[in-house]
Image (cartoon, rainbow, N blue to C red):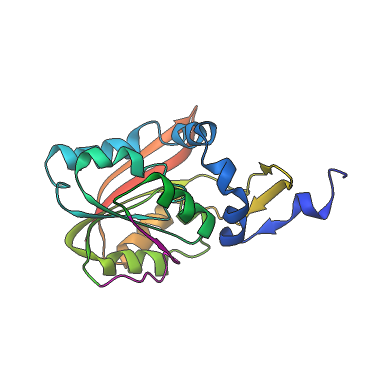
Amino acid sequence: MSYKSKLRSKLYAPEEGYDLYAEEYATAKSYQSLDEFEEGVLMEMINGLGDTGFLKGKNLLDAGCGSGRIISRLKNLEANITAIDISEKMIEIVRKKNSGVEVVKGDVRKMPFESGKFDVVIAPFVIVHMKKLDAFFEECYRVLKTGGIFIFTNVNQRKAPKLKIKHHGEICIESYYHIPEQVKEALDSAFFRLEEEKFVYNGEVWINQIIRARK
């Protein structure tokens, strides 16, 4: 098979792409690579809520949970965890590895949850797959309780990376670049109040914008 074959260069929508990539995604090597984009900042924000006792017994949603990279790190915070993802294969992995977690397949832009259900919504590596942010931000606002916390990341990804998959060669999954100021404008339009913003850098270039906001 040549490097330029259609199979290798095909661009997939997130649902189909992550169904194909789920097995490779759920590896220690993959998690380490994703962690490098956060440098511990995401977990600092989440653990900070736990340190204040805010999370104990509260309802937390991992929106776009993938294969559960963050979920295993949340269990000691004693929150009631719900996870949702558009990929059935990702969801299957989460179910197998995380007992006691409610796991739902669905689109995070139209979630099957009642309004005001959650105290916290987290969404790492999610908005990079959305061309427009309004529907997702508005949906997170809807499912959060008044005073609820929304924590998410905005990865500086101008081009979809090539992902190597056993028996499939290389694929790409649709992704979009979001200017940090425009992300904050969309957040404000959804009526969130920005509480904290941190950047992770590679040299002088930002690689991740991590935000905590409140309803």
Q: Quadrant of residue 140?
A: bottom left
Which residue is situated farthest in the right direction here?
A: 2
The magenta stretch spans which residues? 102-114
Q: Is residue 113 magenta?
A: yes
Q: Quadrant of residue 110?
A: bottom left
Which residue is situated farthest in the top direction here?
A: 203
* Residue 133 drawn at (x, y percent): 44, 63
* Residue 81 drawn at (x, y percent): 28, 52
Name which residue lies at 41% across and 35% down: 200
**Front residue (pair 215, 60):** 60
Q: How many marks?
A: 0
Residue 147 placement, left or right of 19? left
User: Where is the C terminus found, in terms of image quarters?
Assistant: bottom left
* Residue 83 drawn at (x, y percent): 36, 56
* Residue 23 drawn at (x, y percent): 57, 44
Name which residue lies at 14% across and 51% down: 57
Which residue is situated farthest in the left direction here?
A: 53
Q: Is residue 178 visible?
A: no
Residue 5 placement, left or right of 211? right
Name which residue lies at 56% across and 61% down: 15
Q: Is residue 48 magenta?
A: no
User: Where is the N terminus found, in terms of image quarters?
Assistant: top right
Q: Is residue 181 visible?
A: yes
Q: Main secondary structure of the magenta part?
A: loop
